[in-house]
Image (cartoon, grey):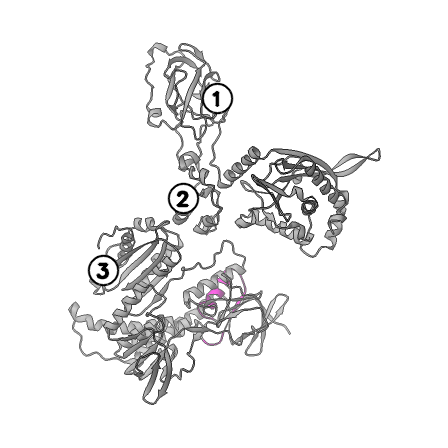
């Protein structure tokens, strides 16, 4: 039987997989993408992109409340939820089509199937497709992503207990909502539903919301959410959840009273899609639902690689893409490649107020033994933020006192998700405080708050 | 026009000197190349030659004057045809005064040093030294730790030196590193006059080599024993081994030499030692360093417990270490330590040489080329392939008889390779 042989077979067409395939094509390698559902993966179809479309709608809705202050009167406001969701789906569809085009342009074939890795061959591995055909590839990259984790005894039913997937395409607005988990996904849904008038309770097992962020950021967002009327419970675990015709009843641990709401969204993390890939009998190691890899995607089994969410946190599309590129460049014999360094992946949360960060939190920097200098600058001291009518938030920077290394940057406030790349570039160029201070930031922009924060770390802030 | 004679900088660190003796007098004619004075530094007395023709107009610093700063005008010459009386006793230009520490405007050449100095202004740092690409953070960390960037290989885009490259660099020996300032480390590029030369800043590696080998020669009383080894049998054994060797394994003559040295160290453990002031360290394994020449210096990666390795494993280890050494990819732990060193210059056709002991080790073996030479066997002249090796030993720890015994053992293994393959 003749088999089609590829240099690289990528299982999964999300932001890790399709980017890896395109990079492979650029390097002259013969690559194929095997995707079971939608090109673009969760990010594009059920994650980053459609949620941003929804959050934009919520933000516009919120801004109407502020119009009066700008001298604009708005009449009756009605919300057409189906139209809102439809737009979100259209945005996702457009981008998915864009990925199809990009792969075609790079002459990367796409096979619509699920795939199982087969036996080793002299020149790679067999890959069995769900349609019965068998192909082979010198290198197989697993980029199958992840799915919502559920809690023991709490099964999402898609009606009252939802995961992000159903939460993204609501038919109607519930009156009340419990969101379990206050990471990026939980915080974004909390913000979205709250802006559309839903009574939201945010439940977090750890001691603060957005627990991976710097504690100052967590505290600021918690305060902003509470001001918007959300109920926030931290240090709370669910004992049991019962879904009935009138909604969801959640029993909590400790002395916390029961919670009752019309619906619940589970946002307690995700788990890698490691099943049915044919990994049994290979040396590939799986640890707590994620494939173990080195810094370049290599698993313990020669010829099998894994990138993106399936390899573990941070579960971020841009991490997956970068890993895909590194993995392929390594396979192609690239030189001077460096695995992603700790703290090099920026994280963004698109709730209101937005949160963006890179590098170490203050607590982590101290724990790592750095002697630090921290700077903090509030958007209340930034002209552009005041003009925008959106001056809540701040920029916090953390430097190593000895070397001037920018250890971390943490921002909350207007458009900070668009600003964080400035600090990412600074870190990747290994700038110190001196270069950041010597850089001219344009006026009037929100980015001036970044400059001032750096200056503040060295007691040189001008506007505060 | 008159010319100033200034106190020369006879070494990069010299800041002042003593005019020990004038060999000229006012009114005397001097020619280029004439010795005009003796200058004393804290280290030595050196003769200073004139590189100009002229007549001595003024001697401004009397013989015996101490602590004269480098650059100070010590005498003034009148050029040919110029009236001596017309020359003012004040130096003609202010250049030397403005930069007393800089070797500017000096119409004299310094005998015994290769540095010539001219009236041409010293070139700026940017013109004379290669630009080093390094991130600001890498520069900051290197400066904090006293690591010279020019000795490092950058792993960033286009070879840019990153923080990780600086952090991976071996820690600098405290004293010399701190003194690497742009002024002293920088190349002083001078005009292309006869005898011109260039000062190139010493890399970190060069400084380490210098200090360690100087320490070795100063502290370890070296003695040398040399022996000729006939290696025809060894070469035949090597051919036979390579025919049977697994794929990818190619045993070199050097691998066999390392093997023989490892076996000899086990057979004569008294030679596998290091002298450490109050005690002598006796190594339990033959941890053999092999000297690998790399760009700008050398490194000595260690083959730990070489006596425990089969030839195939040994060969792969040496090949891997040598290749990574040349690419600058060794980890510090891979070139630190060891009980004995082998330096092989056979590939350059060197017949024999004596190597400097790699401190704190007790001995080093210098290996020459295997070459066909006439030898006498049973009273008859014949031809054999002969390799001459010289053992340099530290007499504090290893006595002559021990060194001889070791060489005898080594020669035995090399000439009867079957015995070392056991």
Apparent side of residue A318 relative to residue A286 in the rendered image (left or right): left
Crowding around mark 1 (Cα neighbors within 10 Å: few <14, some 14 to 19, many 20+) is some
In the image, which disc is placed on residue B46?
1
Q: Are marks 1 and 2 in contact (CB under 8 Å)?
A: no
Is A91 covered by the magenta stretch?
no
Residue found at the far front of this picture: B278
User: From which residue to which does the magenta span run?
Assistant: A13-37
- Residue drawn at (49%, 41%) of the image: B204
Q: Is residue A306 above or below residue B362?
A: below
In terms of image quadrants, where is residue A157?
Answer: bottom left
Q: Nearer the viewer, residue A364 or A284?
A: A364
In the image, which disc is placed on residue A384?
3
Q: Nearer the viewer, residue A138 or A185?
A: A185
At mark 2, the secondary structure is helix
Q: Nearer the viewer, residue A248 or A353?
A: A248
At mark 1, the secondary structure is strand
Nearest-to-viewer mark from 3 and 2: 2
Apparent side of residue A385 relative to residue B101 in the rendered image (left or right): left
In terms of image quadrants, where is residue A265?
Answer: bottom left
Apparent side of residue A331 relative to residue A453 in the rendered image (left or right): right
Q: Is residue B36 above or below residue A368?
A: above
Number of numbered discs visible in the structure rendering: 3
Q: Position of residue A276 (x, y in %)?
A: 53, 76
Q: Position of residue A167 (x, y in %)?
A: 35, 79
- Residue drawn at (65%, 50%) of the image: B306
Q: Say whether disc 1 or disc 2 marks the residue closer to the N-terminus.
A: 1
The subunit carrying tag 1 is B
Q: Is residue A361 visible?
A: no
Q: Nearer the viewer, residue B282 or B237?
A: B282
Q: Position of residue A173 (x, y in %)?
A: 29, 82
Question: Which residue is denoted by mark 2 in the rendering?
Answer: B143
The subunit carrying tag 2 is B
């Amino acid at each position: 039987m003749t088999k089609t042989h590829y240099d690289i077979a990528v299982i999964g067409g999300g932001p890790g997989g399709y980017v890896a395939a395109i990079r492979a094509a650029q390097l002259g390698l013969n690559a194929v993408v095997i995707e079971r559902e939608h090109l673009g993966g969760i990010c594009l179809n059920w994650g980053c992109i459609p949620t941003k479309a929804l959050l934009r709608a919520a933000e516009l809705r919120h801004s109407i409340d502020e119009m009066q202050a700008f001298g604009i009167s708005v009449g009756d406001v009605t919300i057409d939820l189906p139209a809102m969701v439809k737009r979100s789906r259209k945005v996702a569809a457009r981008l998915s089509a864009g990925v199809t085009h990009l792969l075609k342009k790079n002459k990367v074939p796409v096979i619509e199937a699920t795939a199982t890795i087969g036996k080793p061959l002299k020149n790679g591995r067999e890959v069995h497709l769900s349609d019965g055909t068998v192909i082979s590839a010198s290198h197989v990259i697993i980029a199958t992503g992840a799915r919502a984790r559920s809690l023991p005894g709490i099964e999402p039913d898609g009606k009252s207990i939802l995961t992000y997937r159903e939460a993204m395409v609501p038919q109607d607005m519930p009156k009340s909502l419990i969101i379990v988990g206050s990471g990026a996904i939980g915080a974004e849904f909390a913000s979205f539903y709250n802006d559309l008038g839903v009574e939201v309770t945010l439940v977090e097992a750890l001691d603060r919301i957005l627990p991976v962020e710097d504690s100052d950021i967590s505290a600021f967002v918690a305060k902003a959410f509470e001001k918007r009327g959300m109920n926030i419970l931290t240090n709370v675990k669910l004992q049991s959840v019962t879904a009935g015709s009138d909604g969801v009843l959640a029993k909590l641990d400790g002395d916390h009273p029961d919670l009752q709401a019309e619906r619940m969204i589970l946002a307690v993390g995700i788990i890698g899609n490691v099943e049915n890939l044919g990994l049994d009998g290979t040396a590939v190691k799986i640890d707590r639902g994620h494939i173990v890899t080195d810094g370049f995607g290599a698993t313990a089994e020669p010829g099998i690689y894994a990138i993106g969410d399936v390899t573990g946190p941070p579960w971020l599309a841009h991490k997956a893409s970068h890993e895909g590129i590194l993995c392929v460049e390594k396979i192609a014999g690239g030189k001077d490649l460096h695995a992603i360094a700790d703290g090099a992946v920026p994280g963004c949360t698109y709730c209101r107020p937005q949160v963006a960060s890179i590098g170490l939190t203050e607590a982590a920097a101290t724990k790592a033994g750095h002697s630090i200098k921290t700077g903090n600058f509030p958007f209340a001291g930034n002209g552009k933020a005041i003009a925008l009518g959106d001056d809540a938030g701040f920029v916090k920077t953390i430097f190593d006192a000895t070397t001037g290394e920018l250890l971390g940057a943490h921002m909350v406030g207007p458009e900070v998700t668009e600003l964080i790349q400035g600090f990412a570039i600074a870190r990747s160029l290994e700038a110190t405080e001196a270069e950041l201070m010597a850089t001219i930031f344009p006026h009037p922009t929100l980015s001036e708050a970044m400059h001032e924060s750096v200056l503040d770390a060295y007691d040189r802030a001008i506007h505060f | 026009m008159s010319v100033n004679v200034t106190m020369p900088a006879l070494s990069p660190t010299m800041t002042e000197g003593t005019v020990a003796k004038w060999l000229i007098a006012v009114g005397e004619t001097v020619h280029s190349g004439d010795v005009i004075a003796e200058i004393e530094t804290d280290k030595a007395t050196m003769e200073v030659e004139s590189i100009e023709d002229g007549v001595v107009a003024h001697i401004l610093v009397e013989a015996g004057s101490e602590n004269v700063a480098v650059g100070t005008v010590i005498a003034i010459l009148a050029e040919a045809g110029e009236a001596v009386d017309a020359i003012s006793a004040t130096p003609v230009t202010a250049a030397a005064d403005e930069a007393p520490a800089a070797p500017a405007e000096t119409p004299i050449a310094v005998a015994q040093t290769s540095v010539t100095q001219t009236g041409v202004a010293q070139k700026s740092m940017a013109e004379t030294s290669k630009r080093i690409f390094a991130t600001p953070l890498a520069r900051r960390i290197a400066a904090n730790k006293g690591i010279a960037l020019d000795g490092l290989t950058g792993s960033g885009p286009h070879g840019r030196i990153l923080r990780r490259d600086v952090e991976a660099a071996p820690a600098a020996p405290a004293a010399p590193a701190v003194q690497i300032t742009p002024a002293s480390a920088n190349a002083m590029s001078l005009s292309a006059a006869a005898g011109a030369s260039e000062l190139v800043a010493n890399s970190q590696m060069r400084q380490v080599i210098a200090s360690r080998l100087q320490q070795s020669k100063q502290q370890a009383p070296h003695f040398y024993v040399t022996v000729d080894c006939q290696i025809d049998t060894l070469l035949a054994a090597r051919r036979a081994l390579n025919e049977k060797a697994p794929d990818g394994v190619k045993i070199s003559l050097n691998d066999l030499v390392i093997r023989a040295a490892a076996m000899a160290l086990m057979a004569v453990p008294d030679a596998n030692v290091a002298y450490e002031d109050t005690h002598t360290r006796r190594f339990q394994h033959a941890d053999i360093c092999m000297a690998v020449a790399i760009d700008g210096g050398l490194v000595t990666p260690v083959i730990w417990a070489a006596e425990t390795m089969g030839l195939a494993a040994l060969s792969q280890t040496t090949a891997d270490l040598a290749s990574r050494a040349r690419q600058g990819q060794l980890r510090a732990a891979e070139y630190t330590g060891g009980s004995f060193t082998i330096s092989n210059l056979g590939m350059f056709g060197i017949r024999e040489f004596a190597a400097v002991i790699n401190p704190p080790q007790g001995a080093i073996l210098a290996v020459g080329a295997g070459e066909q030479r006439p030898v006498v066997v049973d009273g008859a002249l014949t031809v054999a392939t002969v390799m001459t090796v010289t053992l340099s030993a530290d007499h504090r720890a290893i006595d002559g008889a021990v060194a001889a015994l070791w060489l005898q053992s080594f020669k035995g293994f090399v000439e009867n390779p079957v015995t070392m393959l056991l």
